[in-house]
Image (cartoon, helix red, strand yellow):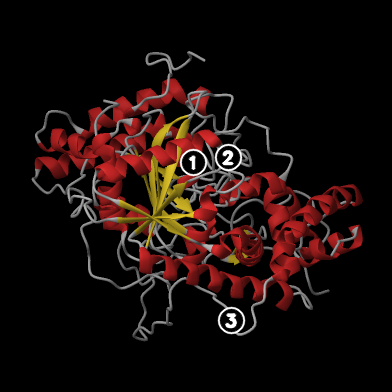
Amino acid sequence: MSLSPDDVKRIARLARIEISDVEAQATQAQLNSIFDLIAAMQAVDTSGVGPMAHAQEVHQRLRDDAVTETDRHAAFQAIAPAVENGLYLVPKVIE
Amino acid sequence: MSEFSLSALAAQLAAKQVSSRELAQTYLDRIAALNPSINAFITVDAEKTLAEAAAADALIAAGKNGPLTGVPIAHKDIFCTDGWLTTCGSKMLSNFVAPYDAHVIQRFKAAGMPSLGKTNMDEFAMGSSNETSFYGAVKNPWDTARVPGGSSGGAAACVAARMAPAATGTDTGGSIRQPAAFTGITGLKPTYGLVSRFGMIAFASSLDQAGPMAPSAEDCALLLNVMTGFDPNDSTSLERDKEDYARDLDKPLSGLRVGLPKEFFAEGLNSEVAAAVEAAVTELKKLGATPVEISLANSQLAIPVYYVLAPAEASSNLSRFDGVRYGYRAPDYASLDDMYCKTRAQGFGAEVKRRILIGAYVLSHGYYDAYYLQAQKIRRLIADDFSAAFEACDVILGPTAPGTAFRLGEKSDDPVEMYLNDLYTIPANLAGLPGMSLPCGFDSQGLPIGLQLVGNYFSEAKMLNVAHQYQRVTDWHKRLPPLGEASGERR
């Protein structure tokens, strides 16, 4: 399997990372060498093997439906790039 | 100060032979002298450190001190620390002052251990050399032309150079063990789920685990006593009874079965590393242990599996960095979407972007089964190999890394070459098993060699016992790098 520069640009688009044509060219070669490494997996027969998502068999815990957090929005918004009236500011999305 | 163990420092503090403030100041002075040449710390704040030390002194004066109260420690810059810059080695978080403490930080604060600062690391813990940090590479104290390993390279270097008596690290694919090996210190990655990941900036959540880094196994045992414990804020935190990880340190090793995976001694292993590890096996035999050959047949697939699973999880975890709520935002953009794309293009370094792209690809439509699902199935095979091996042995032993510390820049242009450094450490992460590295010699260039132990789930006390008994009859962990003691500018 080999990625083309267009593939790289499509993935970068999915990941919301701006990439120039020159960068896509350079990245393509590196990603392809990594996918060559990963390709060793494809020869393994895994029929009947259950996927392992996690190291421990963990279950979702439930807790009492009670308020456990204090209001810290001022502290959290103090570190935001742009805030006004307690709201995060972003460029206009609806005309 | 530099030769004292944590227990010796704690005893001096408890006996009021030294105050925590004096001790912290001694280390701050050493950091000031050595850090310009080592670059182990991203943030040092003497005022905050000394205030925490003064609070520890008050606890000691009031008789309310615990086992390590007043002993200072350095924290990897991956742990959110209230009021401290917390960068994760990235431009993306270069302005991020955390508004809360990670659980690990809460634990050390509750133990009365002052923070000496935040240590340098590969960006978002992605790297094996500490060269991907936005804050510049860390230099290996044993040879400043060489890397300290990564991603916890700052933590390893600061302990090796005795700029701190101990440090915290995190390990997703070897990020505690490989730098510990490269710098001649001891480091332990606990069983997955023993240490809370709350407030530890996520890389690959099913693999990430925090652990201690210090000169000796005994030090690591005492630190593990502080770090572990259930935390409701981490959905994968395990509810277990409290244990004392130092309880078995002094047990004899007679009857211990040490498994030597033949795959870990095969082609690709540096001959000097192999010789040092084999000499350590001889030493353990003298202590009563019996070597057993075992096989981890699927372990050579660990790197391919890891470079599917870890980037997949990373691409999801790192989607939160969008320039809206915290961290870096690009200065110029045309729309919301453009703001996301420019912020992430400018805020992330090359290696982080590569891994996000790999992850986005393997999770994308049409490729999920061939990559992600196949990797998860082989992950199961790798874990099953360990289960079978632990029928025949009590602890697994091998090299931590295939070679010793390499030169700065030597592998930074070839990602695959860099990834191959972690071939012995990644299997334990995939299986969720505890692993540790401890010094077992030096190569002909005077660079430290690390020995890896991998234990069964929750066998940290056993591994620390083996390591401690080895360290009682060897002095590799007591050797100090040849840094100018007064100025730190010898090299």
Q: Please give the name of the residue rendered at 51% of the width and 27% of the height, measured from the top-left corner.
A: B38
| Closer to the camera in the image, B121 or B248 | B248
Q: Which mark is residue B60?
A: none
State the CA–CA distance, disc 3 to disc 2: 36 Å
| Closer to the camera in the image, B387 or B225 | B387
| Closer to the camera in the image, B189 or B15 | B189
State the CA–CA distance, disc 1 to disc 3: 34 Å
Q: Are marks 3 and 2 on the same chain?
A: no
How many neighbours does mark 3 have within 10 angstroms: few (below 14), some (14-19), or many (20 or more)? some
Residue at the disc numbered 1: B179
How many neighbours does mark 1 have within 10 angstroms: few (below 14), some (14-19), or many (20 or more)? many
Label 1 marks a residue whose chain is B
Is residue B41 found left or right of B374 in the rendered image? left
Q: Please give the name of the residue rendered at 43% of the width and 74% of the height, measured from the top-left corner.
A: A56
Label 3 marks a residue whose chain is A
Q: Amino acid at mark 3?
A: Val
Q: Amino acid at mark 1?
A: Pro
Q: Which mark is residue B130?
A: 2
First along the sequence among labels 2 and 1 = 2
Q: Position of residue B417 (x, y in %)?
A: 69, 44
Residue at the disc numbered 3: A49
| Closer to the camera in the image, A13 or B484 | B484
The mark closer to the camera, 1 or 3, is 3
Asked if B386 appears above or below B97 in the picture, the reply is below
Quick one: SS at disc 3?
loop
